[in-house]
Amino acid sequence: MYRGGEGQWAYYLHRFLGVLILLYLLLHATELTAPLFGSGFAASVSGWFRTASYQLLRLLAIGAIIYHGLNGIRIMLMDFTSWGTRIQKYAWYVVIVLFLLMYIPIVNDQLPAILNLGGR
Amino acid sequence: MAIKTRNFDEARRQASTNWELMWWVFMRVSGLLLVLLLWLHIYVGPSLISIKAYDFTLLALALLHGTNGVRYVLDDYVHNGSLRVILKSVIYLSVAVLLAAGALMLAKL
């Protein structure tokens, strides 16, 4: 459909990050509802949710959500306006720039604390 | 089969069933709502946790949007029929359990 151009990359990234977001959401919902599955379960998983690996996944998921949301708006412009498809390539670069503007401050704010957790 | 199209009229022509067209529309509507709700969730975050209707709407829309998205992905890339059924069942079951757990958790708060 996009024949290997920018739109093709936008599409693959949208799908791949969408799956990543759902996997994170399943873990995040488990984190918040853990007490319902028994106090033993809650106690055994609560430590893992504070590890650097889960916090890193959380930071990645925030980035994935920002990209997926911005690109979702690009998709809706293509679906619901007469001009969206004509500008989709240009719109993808706008998505990338907005993504960087929104995500870099968050990484800058949160990554140091995660790295301080070390290998734990 | 996921609808691959660029507007509602095309989607209506391509949709194999009304159900499939309904999901196509749902992905756009829920996607737009999720952009707004998640913006609050990420930037304002914990202060909204006490608003139960907000939390449940966010959880339900995100789980349904994600489940349907993964359904498109599995339909497109997993060609082994029984593996596809197994993967879908695992995802649907986890989503159902977590949606119920989320509702219960919010009811108990």
Image: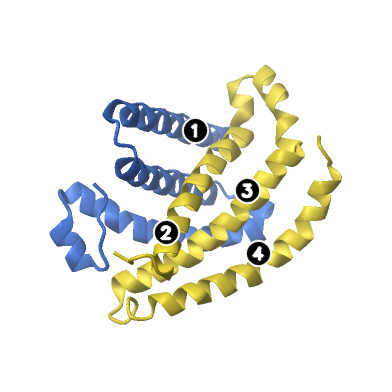
Circle 1 chain: B
- 4 vs 1, front mark: 4
Circle 4 chain: A
Quarter of the image for residue B74 reads top left
Question: Is residue A44 or residue B36 the one in the foreground?
Answer: A44
> At which x and y percent is residue B94?
46, 30
- 3 vs 4, front mark: 4
- 3 vs 1, front mark: 1
Residue at image position (27%, 67%) is B6
Q: Which residue is tagged 2?
A: B31
N-terminal-most mark, 2 or 1? 2
Question: Is residue A43 or residue B70 the one in the foreground?
Answer: B70
Q: Which residue is tagged 1?
A: B98
> At which x and y percent is residue B4?
26, 58
> At which x and y percent is residue A33?
59, 32
- What separation in Å lies between label 3 and label 1 (alpha carbons)? 17 Å
Quarter of the image for residue B38 reads bottom right
Asked whether the beta carbons under mark 2 and mark 1 sit within 8 Å of each other, the answer is no
- What separation in Å lies between label 2 and label 1 (alpha carbons)? 20 Å
- 4 vs 2, front mark: 4
- Which chain is represented by blue in the image? B
Say yes or no: labels 2 and 1 on the same chain: yes
Asked whether the beta carbons under mark 4 and mark 2 sit within 8 Å of each other, the answer is no
Q: Which residue is tagged 4?
A: A103
